[in-house]
Structure formats: structure tokens, C-alpha cells
Image: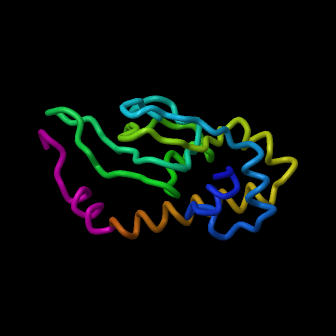
Amino acid sequence: MTAVEALQKAALFREFTETGLRIFASIAQEKVVPAGSPIFVENMVGESLFIVKTGTVKITQKATDGDRELGTAGPGDHLGELALLGKGVRLVSAVAATSCEVLEITQRDFARLQPQKPQACLKLALAIAQDLAQRVADNRELLRELGAKKPAGA
């Protein structure tokens, strides 16, 4: 599967034309991640967006009693997309549950592309914002519950 085909299958790129897909495929780096190896680790600075081409990725978060599995990602899923919009720390870890192939788009390459292809970059930034808004909406009740909890010692 080519980088263009992998992006074509990714929900984040569903509104992109063939030309738009080729633009991002040109800066995407293909990587093989052996089973058990981290793609990124909780609390590290996020600098890349990852698209899963093949395999399964386990998403975990540190808890007092060890790592808690939050879910899995598979072909077409994206991880770490907010890193393209600004530097921040990873809130979770992503570890290859099976041998995986991923596409990586770094924040540095995305920033270099912006002056040359501003419309494509804006379209991706809007797709990331829309995806985030949908995730917040999907988890509205959970967020309300978290907001209602009193901090320890209050």
C-alpha cells in the first residue's frame, strides 16, 4: 500500500482530493514499528501525527496500579494529530500491539509546507479541529462528570 492509499483510507483525510493526498504523502515518512515498541510515550513532547497503515496499536495511560488500556487503533486511524497544531505533551502512550506500519508527518515538515501549500495545510488543520470537536461531543457526559468531581482535599 502506498502512502497516498494509506492516507485515502484515513478518516482525517476523507475530504482530500488526490492532489491533496499526494501533497501530504510527499512529506510523510513510512516507518515499521515492531510489536511491543512505542510509537510515542505519555508525557513526551508531541511532534508528529501518525496514521496506522497496518497492524494494531494499543493506547494506554499511566495509572496508580500500572498502565490502563484505553483502546486500540488500526489501519486508517490517526494518532497524535494535535502535535501538528502546536507542541504539547502526550496525554497517552501508543505502543504497537502487533508489528505495524505507520506514516509519520512531523510538525516541522508540516510547518515547512505551510508557505508552499497553505490551503492544503489549512484543510488538514480544520480536519483536526473537527475531529477534536467530535471527540469532545462524543464524550460530553464523561467530561461533565469529571467537572463535577471535587478535587482531593477540598
Left or right, 41 with reference to 27: left
Q: Kindly report the secondary structure that dominates the magenta region of the rendered protein.
A: helix
Q: Quadrant of the rendered structure where residue 108 is?
A: top right
- The residue located at (77%, 65%) in the rendering is 18
Question: Could you tell me if residue 143 is visible in this image?
Answer: yes
Q: Does the stretch in magenta take in 148?
A: yes
- The residue located at (70%, 55%) in the rendering is 4
Left or right, 148 with reference to 18: left
As drawn, which residue projects farthest toward the front?
1
Q: Position of residue 96 (x, y in %)?
A: 40, 38
- The residue located at (68%, 50%) in the rendering is 3
Q: Quadrant of the rendered structure where residue 66 is?
A: top left
Q: Position of residue 143 (x, y in %)?
A: 30, 61
What's drawn in magenta, residue-wise?
140-154
Q: Position of residue 73 (x, y in %)?
A: 41, 52
Quarter of the C terminus within the rendering = top left
Q: Quadrant of the rendered structure where residue 121 is?
A: bottom right
